[in-house]
C-alpha cells in the first residue's frame, strides 16, 4: 500500500495511537497538529494528527481513510508538547489528557489572519491607553522589580505576602507590561467563586482585554474564549482555573498562580490527576514565559524549591491598608463546657464577641468545613448509624430537606426518627455541619441576617453570586461557610472570624494535615480586617495544646519544623509520592490483583512502597478500594520508573484484570 499515513490521537483512553491513510486529495494538507475527522468505531469523530509518514503501518487489517480536515487552526507544537508531558508525568494516556483539554470534540477554527502581527502592533498602543494603573507602596515596588528581573531570567518567582498586602496589584502591573509587549497573560485562581470577585476588579483595569474561562460557563462561551486565543489578534489576560492551562496559547508572556498552595488546583478524578500549579510551571517553560506564584501560606513544595534555588522568594510583610495584624484567641471548649459556659455549639465568649461586632455594624464569618446539618445520625437506644448502601460511610443529615444523604455517591433517603434496626424513635444527630450552625446563629441573633455559603447553597450560579454580592455589600451580617469561603475574598466590613469544631482539620490520616491546618488558619485570619479595622479570629477547640494552634497564636508559621520532619521521615517534597488505587466491586478480586502488583513493583524499579492498604472510606459507589503508596527518590530516574509502572500495570489489567480499574495519582494531596 502506497501513499501517506497519519497517526491520530483521540480524546479517549487508549495506550496506543491509531493509524489512518491520508486520501490523495488531502496529501500535503494533513500535517502534525491538524484536526481531522476519521472513523472511530461506528462513528466519525475528531482526532489530532501526531505523526505523518510514508511507510505503511505494520497492521494486518483494513487501514481506514481520514474523512476530512476539521478546520485549519490545528494544534501547535507547544500544545502537543504539553499534552505529551502531562501524560508522562501524571501516568495516563495522551488521549485522557486530550479529553481534559477539549472534552469530547476538538474545536473547528478558521485560520489565523495573515496580517496578525501588523494588527498586534496597533493594538499594543491601544492597550497602553486603556489599562489603568494604581499606586504601589515602596515594598510592592521592590517586589515588582524582583519579579521583572526573574521573568527576564526565566526564574519562577514565589511571592510570600501576608493577606491584604497587595499581591493582586503586583500581578496586574506585571500583566499590563506583558500586554503592552503584545503578550498574553494567564491569571490562575483556585475557585470559580474567587474568579467572579476578581472579574469586576480586572475588568476595571483591563477592559476588553480580559477573558474569563471556567467550567460553569456555557460550552458556547468557552468555545468563544478558545477561538479568541487561537485566532490571536490582540493580547489578552485570561482569568481561569486549572482547566485554563489547556487553552491554545500562542503569544503567552506570563502565568500568575494566585493562592498557589490551594488544594483545589489538584484534579482528583478523572485522569489526568494533575496539579495546576505544577503544570503551570511546565507550561511556562514550554512557552518561554515568566511565571509568578503567590500566597500568604506557600506550599512546602514551593518553599523547598526556594531553598534549592529553583524559585526566587520575595516577601510582602505589611498590609496595604493601615489595619494591624489580626488578633487571635483560642477557646478550650472542654474547659468552657465544664464551667457551664457553652451555649449550644458556641462559647459565651464567642457569642459576646459576635454580638459586639454586630453592634458596630461589622460582619462575621463562621467557619465549619462540613456541610449538612450533622455528619451522621445515631439511634440513642441501640446505637445503630445509618450507612450508605453503596459506600462504606455514614449518611449526612440535611434537616432543611429532611433527608439522609451520602456525599460520595449522592444516595439519599427520607429522614425518619424511627430506627430501622430496633424500630424505636431514637435517631438523633451527632456532630454539626453548616446548616446546624446557621440555625443556632439565627436563634442567638434573631435580628441579624444570617446566610450560608457551602456546596449545597451555591449549586446554583445565581445563588452563589447573590450570596457573595450580599455579603460584600453589607446586606448579610453573619456568613456561615465551608473552605470555599477561605480563599482570597476581600470583604470590607468583615472583622471577626470564628472556627467551630476546629479539630476536624486533624481528623484524617494525612501527613499534610498540619500544613493544611496552618494554611487554613492564616487564610481565614486574612479575610478579616482588610481595611482600617483590626480583625480578630476565634478558634474553638478541644485541643488547645496542639502545636499548630500554639504557632498560630505566636505568629509562627511552623513550616521550618514541618519541613524538617518531612525530611526525617521521607515524605514530599523530599521524595516523589505516587498513589496507585485499585478498584472492583469484588473485594477478593481487588485483593488478588493487588497481590500481583506487590510482587511486580520491585521488578519495575520500586524500592520503597507501602500497601496494599484501604483508604479511610474503603468502599465507594459499590467498589472496594486498595491503595499502594510508592516513594521515589528525587535523584533517581523517576520518569522512567513511573513509565515502567504505568506500562506494567496496564499490561496486567489487559491480561488478568477482569474488570479491575487502576488509577494513578502522582503527587497526591
Image (tube, rainbow, N blue to C red):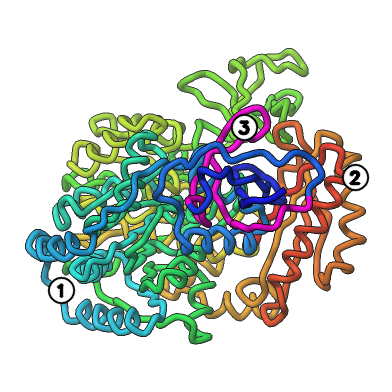
Q: Horizontally, is 163 left or right of 309 in the view?
A: left
Locate residue 508, reporting x and y percent: 64, 53
Q: Residues within 10 Å of mark 2 (few under 14, many from 20)?
A: few
Percent x, y of residue 94: 62, 53
Q: Where is residue 450 drawn, in percent x and y?
A: 30, 34
Whether pointer 1 and pointer 3 mark residues with C-beta atoms closer than 8 Å, the reply is no
Residue on which the image places disc 2: 656
Magenta extent: 29-58
Side (left or right) of 74 relative to 412: left
Q: Which residue is mark 3?
A: 376
Badge nearest the viewer, 1 or 3: 1
Quadrant in which the C terminus appears: bottom right
| Residue 353 or residue 284, whichever sits in front | 284
- Which of the two residues, 268 or 404, is positioned nearer the viewer here? 268
C-beta proximity under 8 Å, tags 2 and 1:
no
Instruction: State yes or no: residue 34 in magenta.
Output: yes
Q: Is residue 286 left or right of residue 384?
A: left
Q: Estimate the spatial distance between the alpha carbons at disc 2 and disc 1, rounded to whole Å.
A: 63 Å
Q: Which residue is mark 1?
A: 136
Amino acid at each position: 500500500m502506497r501513499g501517506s499515513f497519519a497517526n491520530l490521537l483521540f480524546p479517549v483512553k487508549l495506550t496506543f495511537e491509531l493509524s489512518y491513510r491520508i486520501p490523495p486529495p488531502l496529501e500535503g494538507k494533513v500535517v502534525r497538529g491538524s484536526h481531522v475527522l476519521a472513523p472511530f468505531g461506528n462513528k466519525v469523530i475528531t482526532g489530532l494528527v501526531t505523526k505523518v509518514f510514508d511507510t505503511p503501518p505494520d497492521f494486518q487489517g483494513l487501514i481506514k481513510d481520514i474523512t476530512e480536515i476539521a478546520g485549519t487552526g490545528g494544534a501547535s507544537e507547544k500544545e502537543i508538547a504539553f499534552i505529551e508531558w502531562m501524560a508522562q508525568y501524571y501516568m495516563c494516556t495522551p488521549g485522557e489528557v486530550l479529553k481534559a483539554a477539549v472534552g469530547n470534540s476538538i474545536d473547528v477554527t478558521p485560520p489565523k489572519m495573515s496580517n496578525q502581527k501588523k494588527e498586534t502592533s496597533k493594538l499594543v498602543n491601544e492597550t497602553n491607553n486603556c489599562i489603568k494603573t494604581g499606586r504601589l507602596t515602596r515594598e510592592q515596588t521592590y517586589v515588582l522589580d524582583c519579579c521583572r528581573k526573574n521573568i527576564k531570567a526565566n526564574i519562577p518567582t514565589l511571592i510570600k505576602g501576608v493577606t491584604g498586602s497587595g499581591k493582586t496589584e503586583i500581578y496586574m502591573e506585571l500583566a499590563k507590561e506583558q500586554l503592552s509587549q503584545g503578550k498574553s497573560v494567564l491569571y490562575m485562581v483556585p475557585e470559580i467563586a474567587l474568579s467572579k470577585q476578581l472579574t469586576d476588579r480586572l475588568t476595571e483595569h483591563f477592559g476588553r482585554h480580559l477573558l474569563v474561562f471556567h467550567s460553569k460557563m456555557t460550552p458556547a462561551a468557552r468555545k468563544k474564549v478558545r477561538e479568541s486565543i487561537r485566532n490571536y489578534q490582540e493580547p489578552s489576560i485570561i482569568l481561569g482555573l486549572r482547566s485554563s492551562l489547556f487553552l491554545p496559547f500562542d503569544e503567552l508572556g506570563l502565568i500568575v498562580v494566585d493562592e498557589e498552595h490551594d488544594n483545589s488546583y489538584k484534579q482528583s478524578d478523572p485522569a489526568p490527576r494533575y496539579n495546576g500549579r505544577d503544570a503551570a510551571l511546565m507550561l511556562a517553560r514550554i512557552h518561554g514565559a515568566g511565571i509568578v506564584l503567590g500566597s500568604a501560606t506557600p506550599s512546602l513544595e514551593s518553599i523547598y524549591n526556594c531553598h534549592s534555588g529553583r524559585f526566587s522568594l520575595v516577601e510582602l510583610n505589611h498590609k496595604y491598608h493601615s489595619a494591624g495584624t489580626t488578633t487571635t484567641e483560642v477557646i478550650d471548649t472542654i474547659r468552657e463546657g465544664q464551667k457551664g459556659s457553652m451555649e449550644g455549639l458556641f462559647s459565651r465568649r464567642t457569642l459576646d464577641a459576635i454580638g459586639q461586632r454586630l453592634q458596630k455594624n461589622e460582619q462575621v464569618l463562621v467557619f465549619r468545613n462540613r456541610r449538612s446539618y450533622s455528619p451522621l445520625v445515631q439511634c440513642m437506644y441501640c446505637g445503630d448509624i445509618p450507612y450508605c448502601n453503596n459506600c462504606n460511610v455514614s449518611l449526612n443529615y440535611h434537616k432543611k430537606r429532611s433527608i439522609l444523604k451520602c456525599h460520595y455517591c449522592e444516595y439519599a433517603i427520607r429522614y425518619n426518627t424511627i430506627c430501622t434496626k430496633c424500630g424505636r424513635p431514637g435517631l438523633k444527630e451527632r456532630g454539626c455541619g453548616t446548616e446546624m450552625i446557621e440555625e443556632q446563629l439565627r436563634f442567638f441573633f434573631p435580628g441579624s441576617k444570617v446566610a450560608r455559603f457551602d456546596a449545597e447553597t451555591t449549586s446554583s450560579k445565581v445563588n452563589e453570586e447573590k450570596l457573595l454580592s450580599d455579603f460584600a455589600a453589607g446586606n448579610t451580617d453573619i456568613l456561615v461557610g465551608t473552605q470555599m469561603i477561605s480563599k482570597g475574598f476581600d470583604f470590607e466590613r468583615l472583622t471577626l472570624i470564628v472556627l467551630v469544631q476546629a479539630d476536624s482539620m486533624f481528623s484524617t490520616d494525612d501527613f499534610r494535615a498540619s500544613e493544611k491546618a496552618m494554611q487554613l488558619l492564616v487564610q481565614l485570619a486574612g479575610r478579616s480586617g482588610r481595611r482600617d479595622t483590626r480583625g480578630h479570629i476565634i478558634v474553638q477547640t478541644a485541643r488547645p495544646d496542639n502545636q499548630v494552634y500554639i504557632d498560630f497564636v505566636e505568629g509562627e508559621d511552623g513550616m521550618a519544623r514541618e519541613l524538617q520532619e518531612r525530611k526525617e521521615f521521607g515524605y514530599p517534597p523530599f521524595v516523589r509520592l505516587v498513589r496507585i488505587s485499585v478498584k472492583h466491586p469484588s473485594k477478593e478480586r481487588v485483593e488478588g490483583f493487588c497481590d500481583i502488583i506487590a510482587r511486580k513493583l520491585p521488578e519495575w524499579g520500586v524500592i520503597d512502597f507501602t500497601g496494599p492498604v484501604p483508604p479511610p472510606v474503603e468502599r465507594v459507589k459499590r467498589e472496594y478500594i486498595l491503595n499502594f503508596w510508592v516513594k521515589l527518590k528525587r535523584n533517581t530516574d523517576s520518569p522512567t520508573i513511573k513509565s515502567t509502572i504505568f506500562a506494567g500495570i496496564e499490561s496486567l489489567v489487559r491480561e488478568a484484570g477482569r474488570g479491575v480499574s487502576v488509577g494513578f495519582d502522582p503527587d497526591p494531596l
